[in-house]
Image: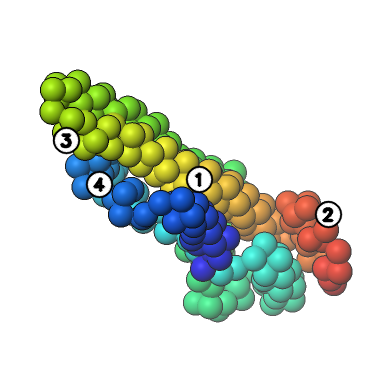
């Protein structure tokens, strides 16, 4: 679980609620018609802009904003170093026995090709092709949340216009002016709140998660190819450490 994402959302909402309660009532900022305009209009526009399966599939991507990878890059490097030692000691076919203990399907598929004697060029082509499709899927999720963050304030303005029109039509009845003005202002508030506290930050978090995952998989590609080529475990470890920032390399034993 990614505490930072949850903490950010909760603290942001908490500060806004505290500011509201400091000078007014929370019930003043709860308006169902305004929510219908902003949320309903935003998601209606999303369904117009994207295919239904893309919108439904984004729920699988959004989990990445609230979770962290179970395997760290150093864990992956240590595993490759161990596999390389086994391959040099017992032959590359010995790696086949360890495949059942590997959770990462991308890594497992690459090692299976290496064990089967697939040419390094073919292994790289197949794995990098999968990397490309993974990046495309991640980008689609980011695009949907960026679109949500774009449409939300726009429909907030639509609600503002609706509220102002209703208010102007009721100028002869002062009792109706307050309701129209409330709808006009609260929809703008909802649009800005959802866009800047939820949708746009989640899009940014998904971008960061995607970059991390793709870097990890690029590391895996190089590790698989190094094992296929029979590189020395020490050299393999040093090569893969180049994918990590300098601070993460300190104390790592490639022996």
- Which callout, 2 or 4, points at the residue further toward the start of the chain? 4
Q: Nearer the viewer, residue 95 or 15?
A: 15
Q: Which residue is mark 1?
A: 201
Secondary structure at badge 2 equals helix
Q: Residues within 10 Å of mark 3 (few under 14, many from 20)?
A: few
Whole-number angstrom distance, CA of label 2 to CA of label 3: 66 Å
Residue 102 placed where, x, y %? 54, 72
Whole-number angstrom distance, CA of label 3 to CA of label 1: 39 Å
Secondary structure at badge 1 equals helix
- Which callout, 2 or 3, points at the residue further toward the start of the chain? 3
- Which callout, 2 or 1, points at the residue further toward the start of the chain? 1
Secondary structure at badge 3 equals helix
Q: Which residue is mark 2?
A: 246
Against 254, is 5 above or below?
A: above
- Which callout, 3 or 1, points at the residue further toward the start of the chain? 3
- Which callout, 4 or 3, points at the residue further toward the start of the chain? 4
Q: Which residue is mark 4?
A: 31
> Do callouts 2 and 4 mark residues in contact (Cβ within 8 Å)?
no
Against 220, is 99 above or below?
A: below
- Which callout, 1 or 4, points at the residue further toward the start of the chain? 4
Q: Which residue is mark 3?
A: 175
Whole-number angstrom distance, CA of label 2 to CA of label 1: 28 Å
Residue displayed at 13% across by 22% down: 172
């Amino acid at each position: 679980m990614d505490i930072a994402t949850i903490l950010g959302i909760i603290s942001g909402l908490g500060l806004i609620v505290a500011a509201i309660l400091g000078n007014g009532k929370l019930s003043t900022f709860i308006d169902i018609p305004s929510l219908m305009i902003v949320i309903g209009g935003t998601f209606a526009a999303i369904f117009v802009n994207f295919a239904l399966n893309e919108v439904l599939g984004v729920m699988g991507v959004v989990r990445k904003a609230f979770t962290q990878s179970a395997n760290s890059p150093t864990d992956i490097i240590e595993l490759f170093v161990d596999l390389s030692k086994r391959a040099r000691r017992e032959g590359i076919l010995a790696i086949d026995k360890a495949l059942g203990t590997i959770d990462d399907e991308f890594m497992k598929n690459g090692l299976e090709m290496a064990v089967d004697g697939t040419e390094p060029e073919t292994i790289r082509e197949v794995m990098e092709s999968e990397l490309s499709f993974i990046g495309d899927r991640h980008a689609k999720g980011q695009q949907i949340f960026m679109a949500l963050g774009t449409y939300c304030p726009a429909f907030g303005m639509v609600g503002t216009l609706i509220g102002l029109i209703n208010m102007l039509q009721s100028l002869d009845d002062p009792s109706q002016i307050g309701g129209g003005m409330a709808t006009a202002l609260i929809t703008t508030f909802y649009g800005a709140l959802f866009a800047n506290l939820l949708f746009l930050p989640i899009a940014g978090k998904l971008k960061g998660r995607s970059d991390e995952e793709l870097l990890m998989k690029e590391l895996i590609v190089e590790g698989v190819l190094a094992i296929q080529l029979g590189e020395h475990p020490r050299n393999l470890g040093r090569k893969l450490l180049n994918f990590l920032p300098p601070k993460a390399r300190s104390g790592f034993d490639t022996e």
